[in-house]
Amino acid sequence: MYKRQVNAPALNQIFSVNAASPPSAPSGTITTTCTTKANDNKWTATVNFPTVTGGEWYILKVGTTSGGTDVANVTQGVQTGSNQTVSAVLTDSVLYFAQYAVASAPNPTPYQYSPYSGAMTIKCPN
């Protein structure tokens, strides 16, 4: 058994241990809503992925390669509703890879995020 002695905080100080373990990798589908196409063949888009029960923070990665972040690498607190959304600019007809992770702890450390979902392909128009 591992033991470690920790000195108590000073009087009237709060000591918190954030020991939440990471949730399982999310498995919901990632979709896009392509709203406006500009003259340069770039779409203003929203990337949508499902809210995970108990999820408080999310990371979304979108890239031109699986696991890539050259388009988006966004960390955000939970939004109300059944989906989380992130804005992105996507080039017309280019196939992108998207995946997300979730943490159920407030102010999570990187170790408290789930593994990433499997990479899913998205594009505009969809």
Image: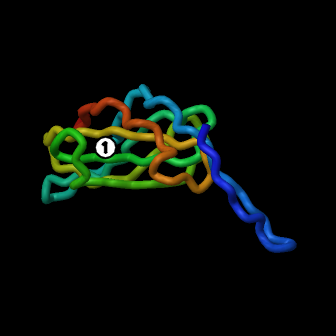
Q: Indicate the quadrant where residue 29 lies.
A: top left
Residue at 63%, 36% in the rendered image = 54
Q: Amino acid at mark 1?
A: Cys
- Provide residue 98's location: percent of width, then percent of height: 29, 39
Quadrant assignment for the C terminus: top left
Residue at 61%, 42% in the rendered image = 20
- Provide residue 108's location: percent of width, then percent of height: 55, 52
Residue at 64%, 46% in the rendered image = 3
Q: Tag 1: Cα neighbours inside 10 Å, few (<14), some, or many (≥20)?
A: many
Q: Is residue 28 visible?
A: yes
Element at label 1: strand
Judge whether 4 appears above or below 120 on screen: below
- Provide residue 13's location: percent of width, then percent of height: 80, 70
Residue, disc 1: 34
Q: Is residue 37 visible?
A: no
13 and 63: which is toward the camera: 13
103 and 41: which is toward the camera: 103
Quadrant assignment for the N terminus: top right
- Provide residue 116's location: percent of width, then percent of height: 37, 37
32 and 66: which is toward the camera: 66
Left or right for 28, reference 3: left
Query: Total of numbered circles in the picture?
Result: 1
Q: Indicate the quadrant where residue 53 lies.
A: top right
